[in-house]
Amino acid sequence: MTYVRSHLPNVDLADLVTHLKQADDAQKREVADASPAVIKLEDTGRLIASLAQAVRCVSLNHDQLAQGHRDKWEAVGVLDDASNCLTLLGEAVTNSHTTAQSTAVLWSDESVVYARRALTQTITNLRDGSWTFAHGPQLDADVATRMNADLKLLPPE
């Protein structure tokens, strides 16, 4: 406590703890309300590619991290959600189920939530011009459209 107060004198610790608890509770509710999903391997591949592009988009727009708190935390949130989802999917893909028709991957409720949040925020930032791939607005619009189509592969909220 003394360390935090000496290095962050303007931080209201009680308020910080309250906000962290609220965010944790909100995430737990979001996961509890989500459903696991069985998604074809090909569609899982599309979603993995979209999540990787979300991470790339944040890295290309790293200057956003230096701007306001909201911009920084949105970018960090996309990185956190995408990396958590990709980690969970790595395990899920190794446990995929193959039938005569196709291979399916069981996505956990958490991975569905992480993917949905990372892609939704990236799509929003691409569409409103906050983030860009720096190859012109048409490419940004095309990527956002493809990500939105991939997002629809997940179960609805």
Image (cartoon, grey):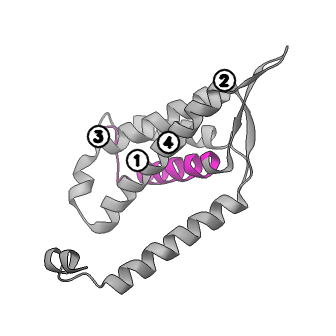
Residue 79's spot in the image, x, y percent? 40, 47
Point out the residue furthest to the front here.
2
Q: Quadrant of residue 151?
A: top right
Give the labeled residue for mark 4.
Answer: 144
Residue 102's spot in the image, x, y percent? 78, 19
Label 2 vs label 3, nearer the camera: 2
Residue type highlighted by circle 3: Leu
Give the labeled residue for mark 1.
Answer: 79
The residue located at (36%, 79%) in the rendering is 16
User: Does residue 16 lie above or below 55 as drawn?
Assistant: below
Element marked by disc 4: helix
The answer to whether residue 108 is visible is yes
Tell which circle, 2 or 3, labels the residue nearer the N-terminal end.
2
Give the labeled residue for mark 2.
Answer: 42
Q: Is-magenta flag for residue 42? A: no
Tell which circle, 3 or 1, labels the residue nearer the N-terminal end.
3
The residue located at (37%, 86%) in the rendering is 14
Give the labeled residue for mark 3.
Answer: 60
Residue type highlighted by circle 2: Glu
